[in-house]
Amino acid sequence: MLRAKGGRSVDAAQLPAQMTVPAPMRPGWAEALAMETPGGAVRAAAERGCPLEGAAARPVITPQTILVGQGKVFISSSFIAACESLGMCVQPAPPGNGPAKEHVERTFSSINTLFVQHVAACTGSHTGERGKDAEGEAVRTPARLDDLLQEWIICGRQEREHDGLRHPVTPRCALSPKDGGGADRRVRVRPGATGP
């Protein structure tokens, strides 16, 4: 979810529900972004009555536990209540302990290096590193940037191999999130590990 300014508690509270259902295709998206074969979590969402027709190929997950940082929106009562209403447990990471949520930090790094760097007027992740006329060069609305981010999540992020994704039958072969047809067929292991 992309916001022009920092996220609010209501934004965070919507995330658990959004991740458990298929996302609709957005106007103007290429048909290549549509869901092809529903994986395990998508099939479960369909059994709960979620429509699959016109769904985008964005990941659908139903986690048991969500590890969060110490940001106010993620330790708010509204976010915790939203998670608990869906049967998800919220586990706060220890304060100032980046390695406890390294997968989240790695995702932010990927967004910065593989997506944000290609956005007009962006020359770095800190406002002091922006170009001379960043305001004049920024021609996309926040809604359009969110469309681009969602496309990148589907195309770029989901097709990129990750060392942390392995299949139990072929543990030495790195997979992309799209490989294997669904989260129920992948196993997350530490880099360098040889099996589940």
Image (cartoon, helix red, strand yellow):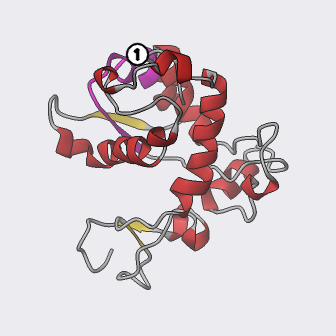
**Image spot of residue 43 (x, y percent):** 70, 57
In magenta segment, residue 72: yes
Q: Quadrant location of residue 39? A: bottom right
Q: Residue at x 21, y 44 (%)?
A: 100
Instruction: State left or right for residue 113 relative to residue 99.
Output: right
**Image spot of residue 91 (x, y percent):** 30, 35
Q: Quadrant location of residue 29? A: top right
**Image spot of residue 44 (x, y percent):** 67, 54
The secondary structure type at the circle numbered 1 is: helix
Q: Quadrant of the C terminus?
A: bottom left
Q: Quadrant of the N terminus?
A: top right
Q: Which residues are magenta?
A: 65-80
Q: Residue at x 46, y 19 (%)?
A: 133
Whether residue 60 is visible to the viewer of this picture, yes or no, is: no
Q: Which residue is mark 1?
A: 77
Q: In the image shown, does 89 or 147 lie closer to the viewer? A: 147
Instruction: State left or right for residue 42 relative to residue 129.
Output: right
Residue that sits furthest to the front in the current view = 132
Disc count in the image?
1
Question: Which amino acid type corresponds to the residue marked 1 in the rendered image?
Answer: Ser
**Image spot of residue 24 (x, y percent):** 76, 41
Q: Is residue 79 above or below residue 118?
A: above
